Structure formats: C-alpha cells, structure tokens
Amino acid sequence: MFLELDMAGDKPIYVQLKEQIIEGIARGSLRPGDDLPSVRALAADIGINLHTVNKVYQQLRQEGYIQIHRSRGVMIHPDGFLKADKTYRTNLKATLRPLIAEAIVHDFSAEEFARLSQEVYEQILTKEGGEDE
C-alpha cells in the first residue's frame, strides 16, 4: 500500500492516512477482502505512532470500510460498501457546506467549484494522482 503523508503539513496525520486509505478503495487499488497491514506494521512502515494508526482503523471500522478480526487481521470490508443513503447524503452536504462557503468568500463561482469537483472525481477514478495547482 503506497501512502504519502506530509508530516510537516497543516492536515493532521490521522486525517491524511484515513483519506488516503479511502481514496485507495475509491481508486480500486484496495479491494473488498484485501488485507491491510497490522496497526504495528503500518505504524513502523510509515514512521508514525501506533495509536494514530489504531485511531484511523477504528474510524474506518465504524464507518464500514474495514473489518478487524483478532485472528485474521485487518481487511477492506469483504462485502463491499453500502450505497449512498439519506444519512450519507446529509453528512456529505454538511462536509461540503464549509468548503463551498470558503470558495464563495474567495470569489470562486459555482461553475468553477463544479468543474473542479468533476476534475478531482475523474482523477480519482482514472487513478491519476495528485495535487496540482
């Protein structure tokens, strides 16, 4: 699993780790049933505290992305993922609201926001990487 964390960045390490695992699932590089490293192994591999990895794994488990078994270890949820429901849509809207407000403050039009959203969506689906501009 390829992870690229910015240890000196403003975004907390646990948020970066969680977002990158979810993006790996979205891209298809992490598939249902795939094993993930143990908490200790991943912490050692990327040089972070094991409590940070444990926090991320617990959040991902609670949100239905992974399963944690005492005997089998950590894996991407083998049954796949639930489709977007009303609760998911409500949470997504709440997450988008401050981003859109910030974009408005910076004189970013609705069209520009939609275009940028589409661009990022397509980058994830086509497995193009990163951040540009």
Image: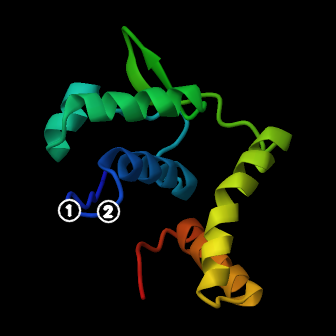
The residue type indicated by label 2 comes to Asp
* Residue occupying image coordinates x 55% and y 71%: 126
Q: Secondary structure at mark 1?
A: loop
The answer to which quarter of the image holds residue 110 is bottom right
Would residue 37 be seen by someone viewing this image from the given angle? no
Q: Residue 46 location in percent, x, y?
A: 18, 46
Q: Residue 39 location in percent, x, y?
A: 27, 27
Tell me the residue that label 2 is attached to.
Answer: 10
Q: Residue 82 location in percent, x, y?
A: 73, 36
* Residue occupying image coordinates x 79% and y 47%: 90
Tell me the residue that label 1 is attached to.
Answer: 8
- The residue at the far front in this view is 105
* Residue occupying image coordinates x 36% and y 8%: 71
Look at the image and name its color scheme.
rainbow
The answer to which quarter of the image holds residue 116 is bottom right
* Residue occupying image coordinates x 64% and y 91%: 107
Would residue 79 be seen by someone viewing this image from the given angle? yes
**Residue in the foreground of this view, choosing between 71 and 120:** 120
Q: Which quadrant, please, contains the C terminus?
A: bottom left
- The residue at the far top in this view is 71
The residue type indicated by label 1 comes to Ala
As displayed, is residue 102 above or below residue 42?
below
Q: CA distance from mark 2 to mark 1?
A: 7 Å
Left or right, 63 with respect to 52, comes to right
**Residue in the foreground of this view, choosing between 66 and 71:** 66
